[in-house]
Image (tube, rainbow, N blue to C red):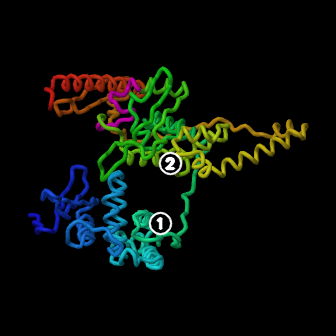
């Protein structure tokens, strides 16, 4: 039986989305109603720790009175709860609360706000880098990652910026702190030959349309997986990108993108639109890329990440992140003559400057090539000689790997004898039970074709039954 928390200790509960929430009363309004604050965490233990720091920041009294002499920890909590938290997504809230309640407040929270110096913060960030890790110390070591230290510093600097604006302090002591250098992750680009092998293998894995659309548009993973059929105008090829999906503690959440620039409309090539139209006839969901197990929701980003690595390995391609597929699209677009402003709009960057900053190495190389072309053009006779030396890469000949086990949602095939194959598909019906149907063929290839047709037919029937069931359900249920 769970131990009941005492009055004043606050409450901790497990939310429906899988996260733990801690809540404590911090004061009362003019009507005598309690005013509360809350924290979120991935585990109950972490939630309890954050809640203790939240209570410590409140000092056990009523609402915080903002003043220059208040503890830095009190100000951090006040700034987060009142200025920052309301505008943050749930996943970002978890990160902020981690830096504030598990690191900054325990580290420098007792120092008065108007006494906090740059040396205090510098020492804190240095110690954080050396031994600030709270979990998985045996695996990763005691020190925090460079990016984590910089993230904590960014949160502290934003809070202190607000303190300057409020007139509580004259200058921001976080400005000028020496931080670990930000090492950008290496950008890996698939070659044209790798892309061909990758897509051939993706077709075998049943993820061809998903990855081809990514390599055609350069969308962020969450944007791609949040697409619905209503976002695409098949007549004009206009595709509206207006949401993103992400996973929080194993639960999927769909929200608007972080920036206004991320909400955009792009034009798909006619061949891509035609392919999606054919693909749509096999999909009975509002989502363009639904979960095979739960078609009423989008496919899980984590699952796509894992499948990407499997497909890359089977295709003999180098290991890249999903985001590198976005880089691959951007690189190919620039190399094929797309201007930076257009590319920036297509991939949803806030400005062209962001695009230029990320792909400087590409634009620099393009300028070098242009200079060489000008030089060759002036040379005249050398141009044809150069063209003669260009080797045209042969088309890729690649036989995809066929896994021994079939993917969920693709049925099963068994060989009865030398001349007979059986295909079976057993989806869960609206009564909650599995309904199986079989087909038979003389060859495995014929069996695959018949089974694919059976799956489409049963998916259509199931979708129609669900729609009819929903229509019969009384309103308000």
Q: On the image, which quarter does residue 230 sit in? A: top left
Q: Which residues are magenta?
A: 280-294
Describe residue 70's horizontal placement relative to residue 176 as left or right: left
- Residue at image x 19%, y 59%? 35
x and y, in percent, of residue 69 in the image: 34, 76
Residue that label 2 marks: 323
| Residue 466 visible within the image | yes
Secondary structure beneath label 1 = helix
Other-residue count near label 1 (Cα within 10 Å), few / some / many at <14 / 14–19 / ≥20:
some
178 is higher (above) or lower (below) than 455:
below
Q: Quadrant of residue 76?
A: bottom left
Which of the two marks, 2 or 1, is nearer to us in this view?
1
| Mark found first going from the N terminus, 2 or 1 | 1
Task: List x then y, in percent, for residue 303.
Answer: 38, 46
- Is residue 192 visible in the rendered image? The answer is no
| Dominant secondary-structure state across the stretch colored magenta | loop
Q: Secondary structure at mark 2?
A: helix
Q: For the N terminus, which image quadrant?
A: bottom left
Q: Classify 275 as above or below 264.
A: above
Residue 233: where, in percent of width, then height? 45, 24
Whether 401 is among the magenta residues is no
Question: What's the residue at 23%, 33% (across, down)?
Answer: 428
Q: Nearer the viewer, residue 305 or 363?
A: 363
In depth, the one of 4 and 352 nearer the eye is 352
Disc 2 and disc 1: Cα gap in Å? 22 Å
Residue at x 36% of width, y 23% of height: 453
Give the residue drawn at x 21%, y 22%: 468
Q: Residue at label 1?
A: 150
Position of residue 248 in the picture relative to residue 344 (left or right): left
């Amino acid at each position: 039986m769970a131990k009941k928390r005492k009055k004043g200790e606050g409450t901790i509960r497990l939310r429906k989305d899988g996260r733990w929430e801690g809540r404590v009363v911090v004061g009362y309004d003019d009507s005598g109603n309690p005013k509360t604050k809350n924290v979120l965490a991935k585990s109950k233990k972490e939630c309890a720790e954050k809640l203790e720091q939240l209570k410590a920041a409140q000092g056990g009294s009523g609402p915080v009175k903002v003043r220059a002499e208040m503890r830095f920890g009190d100000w951090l909590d006040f700034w987060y709860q009142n200025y920052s938290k309301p505008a943050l997504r749930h996943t970002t809230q978890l990160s902020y609360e981690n830096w504030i309640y598990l690191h900054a407040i325990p580290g420098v929270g007792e120092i008065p706000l108007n006494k906090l110096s740059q040396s205090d913060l510098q020492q804190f960030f240095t110690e954080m880098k050396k031994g600030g890790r709270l979990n998985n110390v045996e695996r990763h070591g005691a020190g925090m990652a460079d990016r984590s230290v910089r993230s904590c510093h960014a949160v502290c600097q934003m809070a202190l910026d607000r303190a300057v604006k409020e007139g509580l302090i004259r200058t921001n002591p976080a400005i000028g702190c020496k931080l670990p250098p930000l090492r950008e992750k290496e950008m890996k680009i698939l070659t044209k030959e790798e892309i061909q092998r990758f897509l051939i293998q993706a077709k075998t894995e049943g993820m061809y349309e998903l990855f081809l659309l990514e390599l055609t548009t350069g969308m962020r993973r969450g944007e791609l997986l949040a697409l619905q059929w209503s976002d695409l105008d098949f007549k004009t090829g206009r595709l509206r990108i207006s949401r993103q999906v992400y996973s929080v503690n194993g639960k999927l959440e769909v929200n608007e993108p972080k920036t206004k620039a991320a909400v955009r409309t792009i034009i798909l090539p006619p061949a891509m639109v035609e392919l999606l139209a054919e693909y749509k006839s096999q999909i009975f969901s509002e989502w363009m890329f639904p979960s095979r197990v739960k078609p009423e929701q989008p496919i899980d980003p984590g699952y796509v990440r894992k499948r990407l690595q499997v497909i890359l390995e089977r295709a003999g391609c180098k290991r890249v992140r999903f985001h590198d597929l976005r880089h691959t699209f951007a690189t190919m677009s620039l190399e094929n003559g797309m201007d930076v402003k257009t590319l920036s709009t297509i991939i949803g960057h806030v400005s062209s400057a962001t695009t230029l900053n990320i792909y400087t190495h590409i634009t620099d190389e393009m300028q070098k090539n242009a200079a060489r072309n000008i030089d060759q053009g002036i040379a005249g006779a050398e141009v044809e000689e150069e063209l003669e030396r260009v080797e045209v890469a042969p088309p890729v000949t690649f036989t995809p790997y066929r896994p021994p086990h079939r993917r969920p949602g693709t049925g099963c095939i068994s060989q009865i004898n030398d001349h007979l194959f059986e295909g079976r598909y057993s989806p869960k019906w609206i009564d909650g039970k599995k309904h199986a149907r079989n087909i038979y063929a003389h060859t495995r290839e014929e069996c695959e074709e018949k089974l694919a047709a059976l799956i489409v037919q049963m998916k259509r029937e199931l979708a129609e039954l669900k729609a009819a069931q929903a229509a019969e359900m009384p309103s308000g249920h």
